Amino acid sequence: MRLPPASLALQKKAHRPGFAALDRRHHPAHRQRFNQALIKEILEAMRADFEKAHPAECSEIVCPLCLQPFTYEKGSKRLPSAEHIRPSSLGGTLEFPVVTCTKCNNNHGRKMEAHLKNAMQAFDFLDGKGVMPVKIQNEYGHVSVNLDWKAEPITFRVLGKKASDTRALEELPKLFRENPKITFTMNFGFTWEAYSRAVLRIGYLGAFWRFGYSYVLSVGASQIRQVLEGAAVPENLIMQAAPDSPPPVPFVVHALGDSILVVFQTQNLTTRWTAVILPGPKGSEWNDLAKAGLSAERLLFNVKFENAKSVNFRFAREPVKEMLALQVPAAPR
């Protein structure tokens, strides 16, 4: 089952002046009314799908992430919540929504999505777009600055006096005058494990949107939930993706034998595509799935969309671990 995008009627409401619920700049009350209508519509589709996938428990529709029943009392941690499959901070909208409980929505956002956002900012920085907070050390302490290393000349902008040691800041001009080399440390603000869990979570929700509870209640989905809940993160499941022309949708979910491929777009200073290989419904050995990531450069994936547009995706190995090796010290765990 493919959960429907926000219905045409709701989308029309969303795009009316004064009711642009998909745009954060508009009044919170308008967004709240849209979200409530959207949650009701998606829950109806989820309930019908849950009854089909698990008729013995049709009275207890559950959150697709924690498998706990939704509750509807005000203030409950299990209230239904409209969920962006892709984080809103990276271009995600409620055009393709799912519903999870407020606990999973909020906790995962804090623990995982911030790491994904920081990873995309680090990618942009290393590509010469944007700045990165760094610390310049001298004998009196440190100075916190934003580094723009693609500027001509390389630019350091001090992040306010309170962010630095006073004497170290006073001596900074002398340091630049007298030293041909400047030593600084940077922290990208994410860990490989949390970044990987964030990507797996997007893939998992994408698979739920595409296949419904028949996937969520499967062995393969259970493997992913164990990782999201703290089990060791498998390696080589994530790849960089590059479409040969702009796809008409921001993510693609496709069954590939005993696995599922999810490809999704993120938008920060640069638009990027990321792919992740998930276990199929029957479950898969992580090492078997990792073979695709290890041979990413040899893969080609063709997608034909409903409007007859055809897009080829090529892949490359995920460089996050190599990127993290550039920072000193490593990001806090």
Image (cartoon, grey):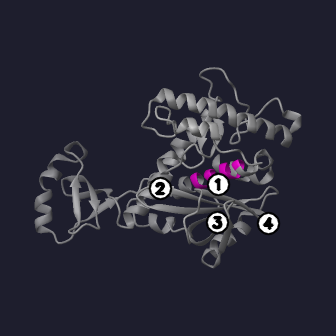
Q: Amino acid at mark 3?
A: Lys
* Nearest to N terminus: mark 1 or mark 3: 1
Q: Is residue 247 magenta?
A: no
Distance in Å between CA atoms under marks 3 and 2: 22 Å
As drawn, the label of residue 257 is: 4
Disc 2 vs disc 4: which is toward the camera? 2
Residue where numbered disc 3 is placed: 309
Which disc is residue 203 wearing? Answer: 1
Q: In the image, which disc is placed on residue 51?
A: none
Disc 2 to disc 1, C-alpha distance: 17 Å
Residue 62, x across and y down, in percent: 74, 35
Q: Residue at x 81, y 48 (%)?
A: 214
Q: Nearer the viewer, residue 239 or 264?
A: 264
- Tag 2's secondary structure? strand
Residue at 26%, 65% in the rendered image: 183
Q: Secondary structure at mark 4?
A: loop
Residue 153, by quadrant, is bottom left
Question: Relative to 97, does residue 90 appear above or below in the rendering?
Answer: below
Is-magenta flag for residue 207?
Answer: yes
The image quarter containing residue 248 is bottom right
**Which mark is in front, 1 or 3?**
3
Q: Earlier in the sequence, mark 1 or mark 4?
A: 1
Compute the Cα span from label 1 to label 4.
17 Å
Q: Is residue 232 above or below residue 326?
A: above
3D distance between C-alphas at marks 1 and 3: 23 Å
The answer to whether 95 is drawn above or below residue 122 in the figure is above
- 54 and 145: which one is in front? 54
Q: Total label count?
A: 4
Taking the spot 38% from the left edge, 66% from the top edge, the residue there is 126
Q: Amino acid at mark 2?
A: Gln
Read off the residue under disc 2. Answer: 267
Whether residue 100 is visible? yes
